[in-house]
Amino acid sequence: MEECWLTKPSDLPGSVKDSNTMKTQSKTPTMANVVTKHSISSELAQKMVDEAVAKARELGVTENVAILDDGGNLKAFSRMDGASIPTIEIALNKAYTALFGVSTQDFFNFIQGDPSLLAGIPTLARVAAWGGGFPIKVDGEVVGAIGVSGAPTVQNDVDCARAALALVSDAVPTK
C-alpha cells in the first residue's frame, strides 16, 4: 500500500484552492444522509439523579439511579450508600429498556399478553420488564432514559424516577 502525505490544506480531498487569495476552502458536503437528533445533557442528567436521590431519602429508601442518553450510553449514575449491588445492573437495564419509548411497567403490560413475547423478551440482555424505568422525552422525542432500582418496592423506584422526571416538563408520564 502506498503512503500518502498531505503537506498543505489544499491537498485535502474535497478542498479547492481560491486562485486569487491562495486560501483553501472546504466544499460543504451534502447532508442528505445525516440526521439531527437530540440527547440529554450531562448537566440535566446529573440534576435528575440528584432529584431521584433526594426523593429516595425522603422515602427512607436507598436506590441506584441511572440516566442513559438516547444511544444507551451512561450519562449519570448514583449508588446511594446501602443500595444493593445487584440492583446497579437492574437500574441500568430499566433505563435501557425505557429507550423503547415506554415505561418499563407499560412494556411489561404489553408483553404479558403474548406468551411468545413473555418467554423471549426477558431473556434479552439489558431488558428489564418491571417498573422503575422511564423514557426522558422532550417535544415527544426520546432524549434519554432513567432507571431506578434498589428500594424495597417497585413503587418506590417509580416514585423516585417520577420525581426526577418532573425536572423535564413534558417527560412525566400521565399514568
Image (cartoon, rainbow, N blue to C red):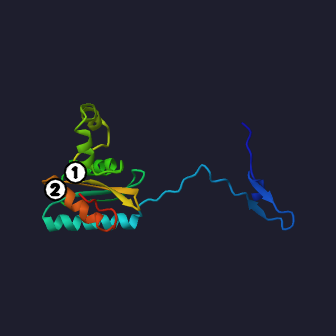
Q: Nearer the viewer, residue 130 or 84?
A: 130
Whether residue 128 sits left or right of residue 152 in the image: it is right
Whether residue 57 sits left or right of residue 88 in the image: it is left
Give the spatial CA distance, label 2 vs label 1: 7 Å
Q: Label 1: how many residues lie within 10 Å, few (<14), some (14-19) or many (20+)?
A: many
Disc 2 residue type? Gln
Question: Which residue does the image show at 26% across and 67% down from the upper left?
Answer: 51
Quadrant occupied by the C terminus: bottom left
In percent of width and height, residue 59 lies at: 14, 65
Quarter assignment of residue 151: bottom left
- Is residue 8 visible to us here? no
Quarter assignment of residue 66: bottom left
Outermost residue on the right side: it is 20
Whether residue 93 sits left or right of residue 55 in the image: it is right
Q: Which residue in the protein does label 2 denote?
A: 155
Q: Nearer the viewer, residue 50 or 117?
A: 117
In percent of width and height, residue 90 lies at: 25, 48
Secondary structure at numbered mark 2: helix
Please determine whether, in this image, residue 97 is positioned above or below residue 60. Answer: above
Q: Which residue in the protein does label 1 denote?
A: 131
Question: Which residue does the image show at 30% across and 43% down from the upper left?
Answer: 127
Q: Label 2: how many residues lie within 10 Å, few (<14), some (14-19) or many (20+)?
A: few
In percent of width and height, residue 1 lies at: 71, 36
In percent of width and height, residue 100 lies at: 36, 47
- Is residue 103 visible to us here? yes
Question: Which residue does the image show at 63% across and 54% down from the upper left?
Answer: 31
Q: Nearer the viewer, residue 103 or 89?
A: 103
Instruction: Report how many numbered discs are placed on residues in the image.
Output: 2
Secondary structure at numbered mark 1: loop
Disc 1 residue type? Gly
Contact between labelled residues 1 and 2, with CB atoms less than 8 Å apart: yes
Tag 1 or tag 2, which sits nearer the N-term? 1
